[in-house]
Amino acid sequence: MRAFIVDPSITLGNDDQACKFYQFCLFELSKHSDTKPIQNDIMLHQSMAQPTDKDIIIFFNRVDNDYSAAFVTFLNEAVHAGAKFYPIAITSAHRVPPKCIPDPQSYDVKDALERRKLTSVQLETIAIAVARDAVSILQPTLTRRNMNLFLSHRRSDGEAIAGGFYDALCLRAQNRFRDLSDILVGENAQEVIENNLRKSDAVIFLDTPQSGDSPWIELELKMALSMNLPIVWVKLGEATNRVNLRIKPADAPHFSEPTVDLGLRQVEQNLVDSVIHKAFEISRDKAMSIFGNLQRMRELNREGKITLETISEQFYMYQVNIPRKGFRYFQRPMTHLVSFYGRIPKEDDRAIFNNSILEQGYSKHPRLGHVYDAAIMLAPMASQNNQDLVDDPHFVDSCDEYVSSLELYSRGQQPSFNQKKAVIVSGAFPDCEPEYQQALWNGLCAFIQAILDRNGTVIFGAHPTFQQVIFDIAKLRRPNDFTQAIHMFISKHFVTQATIDEASSHSTVTGVDHVESDRGKSLTAMRKAMISHENAACMIVLGGKTQRPGIPPGVDEEIELARSRNLPVFLIGSVGGRAAEIATGFQDSGWQNKPNHLSVEFNQELMVSPDYAFLANKLLDALGF
């Protein structure tokens, strides 16, 4: 189970972009898999360079397909062995891979940068994505194409088309949930829906014209967003006479089919296949969050707060030893066996996990019981908060919740933030394609949770979709003081007093009077009030709209206001959008007049790393929170 990565000099010759990409990719691969760099033709012939059907080959295409004889021989042997291939196109002209490769699809670096709204300076972000994608192909716990899919739809005008989707998913052997088909008479509908959402890898939202009038759809979208579940938004039916959605999962739908017949229980098969593929793509991107959580655990290991021992690289299985605290006499450390999953584990995964434990020698003693305290399958899911965590040492739990618990335990009882330890969170969906807007959700959830877990206060400007997610995270992380933990500013230009009063049950709300009934001036007034919050210590910027004709980016104004108050500003660039552009500008200037006091190296890490939970905790540590 190895990742072979071929130096671009073997296929492309001297190409600066490819060489940089190779180094970034190699570094990331080496952290997560047995990586074999092939740096010259001699190494292509060595015994170590003999791939098997468990290996993957990563290499760069050339335009003219004129590869060396040694490289072609190497590829032919890999094809015969059944290895997997990951060809990379450094530009659009390099998309065609060698003719002997069975799968002609290449990863287009230039296209990936453009679709994510990143700049060429953030080549490292794309290289990290490629490395992690390659590793996910090798590791069975990360992704599986047979997913758990939740169908969210409006019955009044979407029942027939949802039935068509349901039937098509059945034919494709996808696990699916649809309330009309899967809720039994007499069952508590909301409870069943919530339980199935928690087990889902992704939500397919069938947005028909009357969807905006359904409280159930609003509830399902709110829950899915608060759980940070991937959502594939499929807009069906005509564009006119639609009820506006109160909650939108992104800026724009992934698919739009205005001419589809909503009254028929049938759907175009190509659409179903495209939706399933999109759900898989987004879920796989989300699965990459386990690498950030692993990095957080390795940091705890380096600091001596836990010890981390690898049991199985293929299944991301580790033994975690946690020192016990607070007793006079010596105690053995707590021992956990954990396996990281980038998806929701299924029943066969549980059997494999339990068998792996036994195969590694962790047999249960007939009288003394297990030699470990807990065996946990860690998945990208909402916190479970159930009795099983206490009564049974074998269970599935939230990956982020587990690592956060280790960090909180290792830090001990944290003092409350002083009066200058509130954080302004600024940003919006970047102007990238909908599937890449998931990065904003990942970053937003990670930073909000980290701030709240350290008894901090989150300050932000109202956003109809974001605010509900922030409210839900606060209620989970800070159940006793969630209204004090969240400070939301909202302009009365956009809402009524009734809306402000309703939001006050979830947070501390400041309504700012509109200015001359002018949208722009009213937003400026709201931003000034927010930035002037007496307890604000810094601003974190994620995403944001890029330049549009006649509309200056709101992020720019907020950054300017923050810097006028000498508040440090931190740009999370890998989310894309305006934050990426501004960070690139600082990078191009050598970080002169950088927006905060931290090192250039740290700012560059904030600009390119997709490990948001790791960044959040590292940043708060650096700020002394």
Image (cartoon, rainbow, N blue to C red):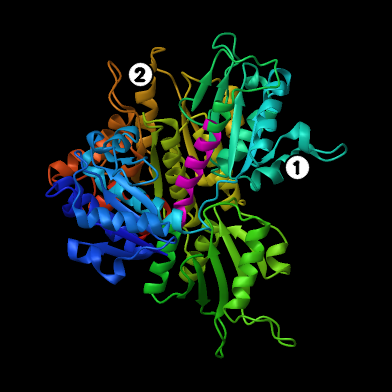
Nearer to the camera, 100 or 157: 100
Give the numbered dot on residue 54.
none
Residue 176 image offset from top left, x and y in percent: 67, 40
Q: Quadrant of the C terminus?
A: bottom left
Residue 571 image offset from top left, x and y in percent: 30, 43
Type of amino acid at the residue the image marks with label 2: Gly
Image height of 518 relative to 437, above or below: above
**Secondary structure category for the residue under label 1:** helix
Give the numbered dot on residue 520.
2
The reply to whether the magenta stretch includes residue 535 is: no
Q: Which residue is at a point 73% across and 23% down the rendered structure image? A: 155
Image height of 459 relative to 397, above or below: above
Image-based side of 122 in relation to 473, left or right: left
Residue identified by numbered label 1: 192
Q: Which residues are magenta?
A: 274-290
Image height of 79 relative to 501, above or below: below
